[in-house]
Image (tube, rainbow, N blue to C red):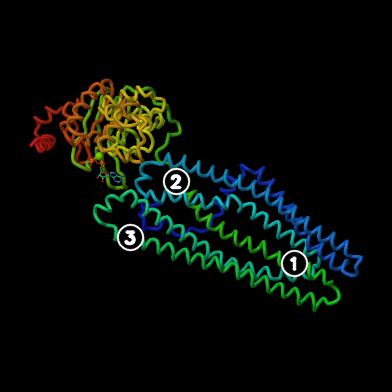
Amino acid sequence: MARNKYDVDEVLETPFDVRHLKRSLKYAARYKGKIIAALILSTFAAVISLLSPLIVQNAVDNYMRSAEDIPMLLLSGAGVLACITVSVLFMKKRAMLMTDVGQNIVYDIRKDLFEHMQRLSFDYYDSRPHGKILTRIINYINSIADLMTNGIVNFILEIFNLLFITIFMFIVSWQLALVTLCGLPLYLGIMLLIKNHQRKAWQRVSNKSSNLAAYQHENIIGAKISQMFVREEENEEIHDRLAKAYRRDWMGAVRWSNLVWPSTDVVGITVQAAIYAVGLFAFRGTLTLGTILAMTDYTARFWQPLMNLSNLMNSVINAVAYLERIFEMMDEPIDIKDAPDAKEMPPMHGDVHFENVTFAYEEGINILEDLSFDVKAGESVALVGPTGAGKTTIVNLISRFYDLNGGVVRIDDRDISQVTLKSLRSQMGIMLQDSFIFSGTILDNIRYGKLDATLEECRAACKIVGIDDFIMGLKDGYKTVVNERGGGLSQGQKQLIAFARTIVSDPKILVLDEATSSIDAKTERYLQNGLNHLLKGRTSFIIAHRLSTIRNCDRIMYVSNKGITECGTHEELMEKRGDYYKLYTAQST
Ligand SMILES: Nc1ncnc2c1ncn2[C@@H]1O[C@H](COP(=O)(O)OP(=O)(O)OP(=O)(O)O)[C@@H](O)[C@H]1O
Ligand SMILES: [Mg+2]
């Protein structure tokens, strides 16, 4: 997926790739025991059900002469009934087995996909609509569930059916069997033609469905803003356009799919007529009536598996289009991952060194160029500067959320690209600009990064940031359930909870990106006192636009022009009368 919007189709139709099918068969192989059992059951069921025309043939040719034949006729009837009953029972057992296998396969794919998704870099999520990601992990996987449940076995079963019917036809009359087989090339030719168009048509549908989901998702997230700007009508128009495109492509695909049935019928009826004609005229006298009856039964059955196969082909075609997307996502390279010989980061002291760091989000547009600085363990450093200068970028690089285009970032003299991500990030406390709150209790949110944190530890953290009283005042206290994204909490409360969450993880290096921007000045002052205590012995990077917040930091770095242009204590920078001075005086007036 390239950088993409809701109204941009992801990829043009890709050629049919059997590797996707092979890959899904690998998932199926884990349950081969059950699949083989289902196949054996199906084979028995098919053979048993195919015995009934033979019984009918025998009855018509031998037991329709006199009243004495009645017991044998009844016995033949009972035989047909027994065949059908046993075959139905076997099929039922098979269905249960395959539902179990299918759901297990879908579970495995879903699990692998989610595990992979969790490791995809920031860049992946930055560059595509989240609705499209959702479509893949929900809709597409649901859609292939059916294929996995019944498709694979039905496919093999129908091929078996076809084979058995052909064998039985040859047993009954090889001449009429050949007549039936003459229709086969015609049928396959028609199917190949339809199939090719059908595949492309379903790929277009899957694109349109994901475009629609992307737009709907964006609008759910942005619903409040839409209403504020009274954008409902325009949004409805866009939605309408996307929904119509979806409907149009769906109808187009269905038109191709609907050609399968009539084509099968036409070929089937033509062949059946040929059987009657050849049987009754060309082989008059040589073939019995029973033989012709049994043959027309087999011929009718012969097209059934073929039609089922072509219908299954539809589901396979759809599923392959979906599998393409699912596997594409599973194959999405994890850009930020442990180096092959990555070591564990030992317990950190907290020295941070940037050496000639160059970084660009997009090729050719450097955000930082040749940036070097040293921060000693325990030092508190403020990053200030104009919007878009690169402050968040710098702190993202310390946690290795992105890889560098040049230079190196070291923590305690270790290149962070050579240590495991887990050992690096678990020792850092990062509070990003948008403090995300997950659905669940407040307590769950606070111990998100340290699952075994006790209530006391969480309360201690909340006391430092000054939100303990507020939480205790809620009806369910720390067990109060908050909605996704923290609905029901004010912006400042969300920030304070996110702050407590960072503190509980007890990091050696603390990164606070606009951590207090939504908090009132009084609460912030209170929090500042708690922080001073907390920051002792930890390296901290604090980004704040409200400069009063960072006055007391050991060092202030002014970020602009793709690097750091001023660096010193508040007093030193004020004396220098440079950019920091201008910013500070602008704020205090
Ligand atoms: N994911 C991204 N993809 C591409 N460009 C990005 C991305 N994130 C940030 N940028 C660009 O990088 C530059 C630095 O962004 P950054 O978020 O580091 O700024 P900042 O100093 O933190 O700004 P602010 O004070 O507004 O938070 C900006 O020009 C921005 O447009
Ligand atoms: Mg920022």
- Residue drawn at the location 45% of the way across and 33% of the way down: 340
Kindly indicate whether the residue at mark 1 contacts the one at mark 2 (C-beta within 8 angstroms). no
Q: Residues within 10 Å of mark 3 (few under 14, many from 20)?
A: few
Q: Quadrant of the C terminus?
A: top left
Labelled disc at residue 297: 1
Alpha carbon distance from label 3 to label 2: 33 Å
The amino acid at mark 1 is Asp
The amino acid at mark 3 is Glu
* Residue 335: % across, % down: 40, 41
What residue does disc 2 label? 332
Labelled disc at residue 396: none
What residue does disc 3 label? 236
| Ligand 2 image-quadrant field | top left
Residue farthest to the bottom?
281
Q: Residues within 10 Å of mark 2 (few under 14, many from 20)?
A: some
Residue farthest to the front?
475
